[in-house]
Image (tube, helix red, strand yellow):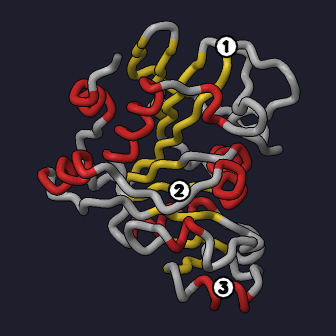
């Protein structure tokens, strides 16, 4: 079993004032990102500990609206122990969550908003339905980033302007693909689950940019047959 104190040491960054986009995913040995449509079927307690530790170290969690719906995201709340650790580090006890949506097909009464520990953020674009933006503004802070599509570069800048510089993206694949295309990914934390899934499961990133971004391996951790990789942007 992994140790959280060691994970904090391995995953924390030296300078929290520097904007950093970290992406976290899990995949099977053969590249499947889900089992029966959900990522939870690939993980175990060690993966959950890494998952929770990355949240612990973040200023904001960013997730696509499709992932919120598919994975059943409710209000995200850190455990009392994790909240106490953050307070001891001079950080807010809880981490806000930003949902990225072009069509705003989330109801204001959704558990994501209703049960949030702190006021959530909605990231959308100027072409999204104005009426729905107004409805969601009652339960979340709405950031308009882009004209006809969400602009990842504008999103990162808008979050950083709010003091949310340590950005953790938890998917889904289309959001990850958009971040890659915009060259916004500074780090990838990838768990390799020791299973062969087969089937027609998605990959961790989708998009048509054809972008290639060299990355440098920072560490390799193991727990049983589970593999935890941390890659960072390779210096130019």
Q: Label 1 vs label 2: CA separation? A: 27 Å
Q: Secondary structure at mark 2?
A: strand
Image quarter of residue 73? bottom right
Judged from the image, the secondary structure of the residue bearing numbered disc 1 is loop
Real-space Cα separation, disc 2 to disc 3, in angstroms: 18 Å
Q: Position of residue 80 (x, y in %)?
A: 25, 51
Nearest-to-viewer mark from 1 and 2 = 1
Q: Is residue 98 left or right of residue 145?
A: left
In front here: 156 or 123?
Answer: 123
Q: Which badge, 1 or 2, is on the more N-terminal residue? A: 2
Residue lying furthest left: 88
Q: Earlier in the sequence, mark 2 or mark 3?
A: 2
Q: Residue at x 37, y 72 (%)?
A: 162
Question: Could you classify mark 1 by the number of other residues whose Cα lies within 10 Å: few (under 14), some (14-19), or many (20 or more)?
Answer: some
In the rendered image, which residue does mark 3 sit on?
133
Q: Considering only vertical position in the picture, is 215 above or below 120?
A: above
Q: Are marks 2 and 3 in contact (CB under 8 Å)?
A: no
Q: Residue at x 77, y 72 (%)?
A: 103
Q: Position of residue 67 (x, y in %)?
A: 67, 52
Residue 225 image position (x, y, % from top left): 51, 8
Vertical comparison of 116 with 35: above or below: below
Check disc 1 and report the residue beneath it.
195
Q: Nearer the viewer, residue 145 or 25?
A: 25
Q: Is residue 133 left or right of residue 154?
A: right
Residue 28 in the figure: left or right of residue 75 = right
- Secondary-structure class at tag 3: helix
State the residue in front, 210 or 81. Answer: 81
Q: Which residue is mark 2?
A: 62
């Amino acid at each position: 079993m992994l140790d959280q104190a060691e994970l904090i040491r391995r995953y924390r960054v030296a300078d929290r004032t520097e904007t950093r986009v970290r992406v976290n995913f899990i995949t099977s040995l053969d590249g499947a990102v889900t089992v029966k449509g959900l990522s939870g079927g690939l993980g175990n307690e060690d993966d959950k500990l890494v998952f929770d530790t990355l949240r612990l170290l973040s200023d904001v969690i960013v997730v696509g609206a499709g992932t919120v719906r598919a994975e059943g995201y409710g209000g995200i709340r850190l455990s009392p122990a994790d909240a106490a650790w953050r307070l001891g580090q001079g950080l807010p006890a809880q981490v806000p969550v930003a949902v990225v949506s072009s069509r705003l097909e989330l109801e204001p009464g959704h558990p994501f908003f209703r049960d949030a520990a702190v006021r959530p953020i909605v990231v959308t674009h100027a072409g999204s339905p104005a009426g729905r933006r107004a409805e969601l503004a009652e339960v979340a802070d709405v950031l308009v980033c882009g004209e006809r599509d969400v602009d990842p570069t504008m999103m990162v800048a808008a979050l950083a302007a709010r003091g949310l510089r340590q950005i953790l993206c938890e998917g889904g694949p289309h959001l990850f693909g958009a971040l890659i295309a915009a060259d916004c990914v500074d780090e990838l934390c990838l768990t390799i689950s020791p299973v062969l899934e087969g089937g027609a499961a998605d990959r961790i990133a989708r998009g048509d940019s054809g972008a290639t971004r060299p990355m440098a391996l920072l560490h390799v951790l193991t727990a049983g047959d589970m593999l935890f990789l941390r890659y960072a942007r390779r210096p130019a």
